Image (tube, rainbow, N blue to C red):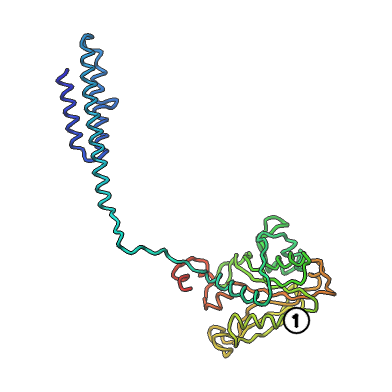
């Protein structure tokens, strides 16, 4: 029995010395010391051994087990040290090499255009305000002179949370909230995201951004509106930019107009950019409807004002000569890095 135990021990020690990975050592442990290992099997067969010899045989088995475990521990430590040395050699860092500079980000073209518009209006004495994107029907439609059943609601068919709450279709809802506060005079712009159920194409998206402007004061007139927007256009597109106003209809303004600017590519002569017309439509505007003033708690006999609204994406598309609105949202670095 002693000879058999010695043979098993030597065989285990030989396999340990030949092992070249922790997995091989573990395999050897299972082979000899596991539940079905060779040494374990000897201990289980002790019931067939003469009772007088059992203590001696048990001592030989335990001694062999102790030697095997000790050798495994030493081999494991040597292997870990060797692997660490190899890893350190392979992953050596040359501190003399220049470091990798982090990639510098920059503003999105929408944000560049927005900051430019804000700069212009702040210079004219306006304040930048914001409001909720999830809005009450009352502020998004009712207080803007768009009651239930009005045709303008069809043009702005949008996303309802319930019958009284909607994803806002225009940032004009912020104007209604500010007028309702009654702190006059009012000079604000309200940029923000809006939602309409438009199909996605080169010029439309179900989610886009608007910038609405509002002035409420005593004795304000349409000439004030024209002068303000003319300054805005010249600041944004160049000193030689001309403006043209065309009659239009908006439920919340009366009179209402669409404003065009002379093409800043051809100077109004006609080119591909302005489709040969020499003019580019840029925004809608008008004098705030007296009924809107009344619904917001202001006296239309004492106060008057004007409002204007422009799509932020439209400014970015025109200013940077981008021909597809979808490029602004595809996160293609080849496109964005141009700005």
Question: Quadrant of the rendered structure where residue 178 is?
Answer: bottom right
Could you tell me residue 78's position as x and y percent? Answer: 23, 39
99, above or below 85, in the image: below
Relative to 21, is 259 on the left or the right? right
Q: Is residue 12 left or right of residue 137?
A: left
Residue depicted at x 25% and y 29%: 69
Q: Which residue is mark 1?
A: 222
Height in image: 269 above or below 133? below
Question: Among all residues in the image, which is located at the extreme left?
Answer: 3
Q: Label 1: few (<14), some or many (≥20) within 10 Å?
A: some
Where residue 97 appears, x then y in whole percent? 30, 63
Task: Check the image and name the residue furthest to the bottom.
Answer: 269
Residue displayed at 21% across by 24% down: 64
Instruction: Give the residue displayed 72% in from the left and 74% down from the top.
Output: 307
Q: Which picture quadrant has residue 236?
A: bottom right
Q: Position of residue 208 (x, y in %)?
A: 60, 67
Q: Nearer the viewer, residue 32 or 60?
A: 60
Residue 252, position as x, y percentages in the image: 75, 72
Quarter of the image with the N terminus in it: top left
The image shows residue 228, relative to residue 212, as above or below, that is below
Q: Secondary structure at mark 1?
A: helix
- Quarter assignment of residue 29: top left
Between 11 and 156, the one nearer to me in the picture? 11
Residue pushed farthest right? 301
């Amino acid at each position: 029995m002693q000879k058999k135990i010695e043979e098993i021990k030597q065989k285990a020690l030989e396999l340990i010395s030949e092992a070249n990975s922790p997995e091989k050592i573990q395999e050897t442990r299972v082979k000899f010391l596991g539940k079905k290992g060779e040494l374990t099997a000897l201990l289980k067969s002790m019931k067939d051994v003469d009772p007088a010899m059992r203590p001696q045989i048990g001592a030989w088995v335990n001694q062999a087990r102790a030697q095997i475990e000790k050798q495994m521990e030493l081999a494991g430590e040597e292997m870990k040290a060797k692997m660490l040395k190899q890893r350190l050699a392979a992953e050596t860092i040359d501190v003399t090499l220049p470091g990798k500079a982090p990639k510098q980000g920059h503003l999105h073209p929408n944000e560049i255009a927005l900051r430019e518009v804000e700069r212009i209006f702040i210079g004219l004495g306006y304040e930048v305000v914001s409001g909720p994107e999830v809005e009450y029907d009352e502020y998004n439609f009712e207080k803007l002179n768009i009651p239930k059943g009005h045709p303008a609601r069809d043009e702005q068919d949008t996303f309802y949370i319930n019958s009284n709450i909607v994803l806002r279709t225009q940032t004009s809802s912020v104007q209604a909230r500010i007028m309702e506060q009654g702190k006059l005079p009012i000079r604000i712009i309200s940029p923000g995201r809006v939602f309409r159920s438009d199909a996605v194409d080169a010029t439309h998206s179900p989610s886009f951004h608007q910038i609405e402007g509002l002035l409420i004061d005593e004795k304000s007139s349409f000439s004030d509106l024209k002068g303000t927007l003319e300054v805005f256009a010249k600041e944004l597109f160049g000193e030689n930019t001309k403006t043209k106003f065309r009659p239009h209809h908006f439920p919340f303004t009366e009179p209402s107009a669409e404003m065009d600017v002379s093409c800043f590519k051809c100077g109004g002569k006609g080119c591909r950019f302005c489709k040969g017309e020499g003019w580019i439509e840029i925004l809608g505007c008008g004098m705030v409807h007296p009924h809107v003033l009344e619904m917001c708690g202001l006296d239309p006999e004492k106060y008057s004002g004007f409002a204007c609204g422009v799509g932020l994406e439209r400014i970015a598309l025109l200013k940077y000569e981008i021909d597809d609105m979808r490029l602004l949202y595809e996160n293609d670095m080849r496109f964005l890095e141009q700005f």
